[in-house]
Amino acid sequence: KEELEEEVFDKEVEPAPAKTDIVREEASVIYKKKSFQGTAQKQYIKRLIDKHGGNYKAMARDIKLNIYQHTKA
């Protein structure tokens, strides 16, 4: 009996069981993307903090150090 294409795509498919413990373990792990700052960005931020401390508004307005025109956010 031939099934229509729509019927085939609408069927629920059960996930295949993991065949090894390693696959089961890896599938259960949730990976988070780690972000990091590059060396140049760390130096850039350090200069702003050295000059302005925690005053983010002043950092945003400093046109000599804040050449990328980052906002206080």
Image: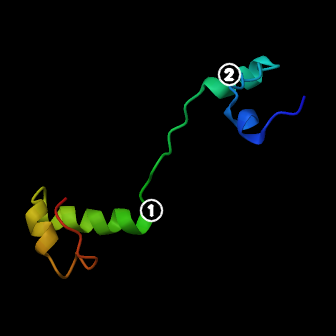
Residue 6 in the image, given as x and y percentages of width and height: 71, 39
Q: Can you tell which mark lies on residue 27? A: none
Q: Is residue 3 above or below residue 16?
A: below
Q: Can you tell which mark lies on residue 38? A: 1
Identify which residue is drawn at 19% across, 59% down.
Answer: 73
Task: Give the side of residue 17 with respect to residue 69, left or right.
Answer: right
Q: Is residue 63 above or below residue 40?
A: below
- Are discs 2 and 1 less than 8 Å apart at CB? no
* Element type where label 2 sits in the image: helix
Identify which residue is drawn at 55% across, 36% down.
Answer: 31
Which is nearer the N-term, disc 2 or disc 1? 2
Question: Mark 2 packing: few (<14 Cα in 10 Å), some, or many (20+)?
Answer: few
* Element type where label 1 sits in the image: loop
Q: Which residue is most to the right?
A: 1
Residue matched to label 2: 25
Which amino acid type is marked by label 1? Gly
Of residue 27 and residue 57, the one placed in the foreground of this image is 27
Residue 66 in the image, given as x and y percentages of width and height: 22, 75
Residue 57 in the image, given as x and y percentages of width and height: 9, 64
Identify which residue is drawn at 41% across, 58% down.
Answer: 37
- Residue 38: quarter of image: bottom left
- Residue 47: quarter of image: bottom left
Looking at the picture, the colour scheme in use is rainbow
Q: CA distance from mark 2 to mark 1?
A: 32 Å
Question: Mark 1 packing: few (<14 Cα in 10 Å), some, or many (20+)?
Answer: few
Task: Give the side of residue 40 with respect to residue 73, left or right.
Answer: right
Q: Is residue 57 above or below residue 12?
A: below
Residue 26 in the image, given as x and y percentages of width and height: 68, 27
Of residue 47 and residue 29, the one placed in the foreground of this image is 29
Identify which residue is drawn at 82% across, 19% down.
Answer: 19
